Amino acid sequence: MIKQRIILSVIAGLLMFTSCRKYLEQVPDSTWTDLSTPEKVTRLLGTAYPKSSYITFCEAMSDNVADKGVGQTERVNEDPFLFQDVRNDKEDSPEAYWMACYKAIAATNLALEACDKAGNTEAYRRQRGEALVARAYAHFMLVTFFSKFYDAATAASDPGIPYVTVPETVVTKQYERKTVAYVYEMIEKDLLEGLPLISDDAYTVPRYHFNRAAAYAFATRFYLFKKDYEKVLSYANQVFPNNDFGPNLRPWNTTYASMSPEQLWNQYTLATENANLLLAETASIYGRYGARYRYGLDYAHEINILTYNVTGGRYVYPVYYYGNQDYFVPKLSEYFVKASVNAEIGDPYVMTPLFTTEEVLFNRAEANVYLGNNNAVLQDLNLFASKRISQYNSSAHILTVNKIRNYYGISDVKTALIQTILDFKRAEFIQEGMRWFDLQRYKMPVTHYTITGQTLVLTADDKRRVLQIPQSATSSGIALNPR
């Protein structure tokens, strides 16, 4: 089926942005002073998730994008594409993400303090579980971006990020980075302590909090990055204990196939969408400019990533465009919050899926590759393909080891299966920033070409693969990353 392409027009509004506060850990809103009941702690924990987005800079650093020559130019998009430190601290910047993570951590620490001081600590069991897992997640994302990617051989000497476990009591406190290994140990400690305490009935809308499925999904990502594949399988199988992954994958080649762009934008980030395990509200202009940034998805990348694939069929993802070159799949849209009822100014937000069924399926498949369970890998890959290939036919499109090896021209089965998983993930998460994690995990070089003829290469050991610590954090004793 030929991909549908429609020319759309966009009217952009003018926004006013507020600057970030310049210290490591931001204290949550001062109204959070009464934490005398579990319900009040739960409300505080609604702020325990980073309210900033990593998508813009992750996507721009990846191999999903090109220099289109023209388009919306913003530092948060341009600098990452050029493999430069981002000279901006506003929405969608690494510094904004750093600040948002530590603000979320501050909320978790206040919540944990309230849980510990409560007379009936058992009544706060669920809140304690969410706070621990949320604290682990924010630190995990920080160490993933601002430290060298986890490598067991070097983690004990690679500088980490500050792991903050107590509420801030002074404006500028001195912190230690310690090591990546230490940060991972602390993440695992919080995660394992928090997981058994998570209970879905603590929330009005579970998908906005670390519900059980989302917490297990986080565990699969953590242990995949750590290369503990048995644990990846264990937690993946707990996300859906009945192994009913199929009904919880996005129905791209059935229900979604008949939706308009507006309907897809509405559906993609709904809390009622089965595939969304955890959603977060993020201050971001990505919903407005994601497709129209100068450095973004162009026609050549769209054909390479979103058309042909190892099944022999064609992906069903609907691709649209603004003008002649701004390609996108309708996923993430902006919602604008006015400063007041009658105001014409306000702030843009994007609801972002942090964990999905698809990621868990891919994590399980990848773990099974390294454990030698090839039949299980093929089952998961074929399940995914059955939801993503236009006019899917199990006879024509079924994946086998030989079919995969022949398609890629790779004789080694393990390498061929991993390549299939990475290609499926690249298509599934296009324009969501997830490709950057795989590029880091496999130390794949990235090459960008500019419209002026420059060739920019980010090699496997390039220091620029580690995001720079915000200059504002140096006042807290945090050493910058080498350049």
Image: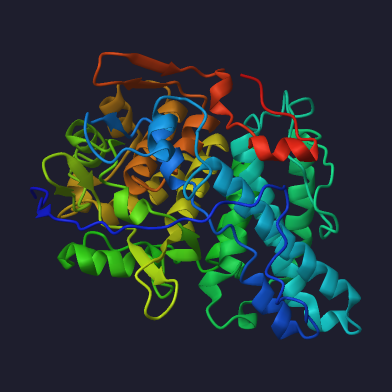
User: Could you tell me if residue 60 is visible in this image?
Assistant: yes
- The correct choice, above or below, for 480 with respect to 44 in the image is above
Front residue of 458 and 44:
44
Task: Tell me the quadrant of the picture where the C terminus can be found.
Answer: top right
Front residue of 320 and 379:
320
User: Could you tell me if residue 422 is visible in this image?
Assistant: no
- The correct choice, above or below, for 431 with respect to 409 in the image is below
Please indicate whether residue 240 sits to the left or right of residue 410 in the image: right
Please indicate whether residue 63 sits to the left or right of residue 176 in the image: left
How far from the left and from the top, in percent, is residue 241? 56, 67
Q: Residue at x 66, y 49 (%)?
A: 231
In which image quadrant can residue 194 be found? bottom right
Front residue of 173 and 361:
173
Please indicate whether residue 473 sits to the left or right of residue 215 in the image: right
How far from the left and from the top, in percent, is residue 204? 56, 83
Q: Residue at x 84, y 58 (%)?
A: 166
Front residue of 376 and 339:
339
In which image quadrant can residue 333 be found? bottom left
How far from the left and from the top, in percent, is residue 242? 51, 69
In which image quadrant can residue 58 be found? top left
- Figure label count: 0
How far from the left and from the top, in percent, is residue 315? 21, 47
Q: Please name the colour scheme applied to the rendered image.
A: rainbow
Q: Residue at x 73, y 35 (%)?
A: 474
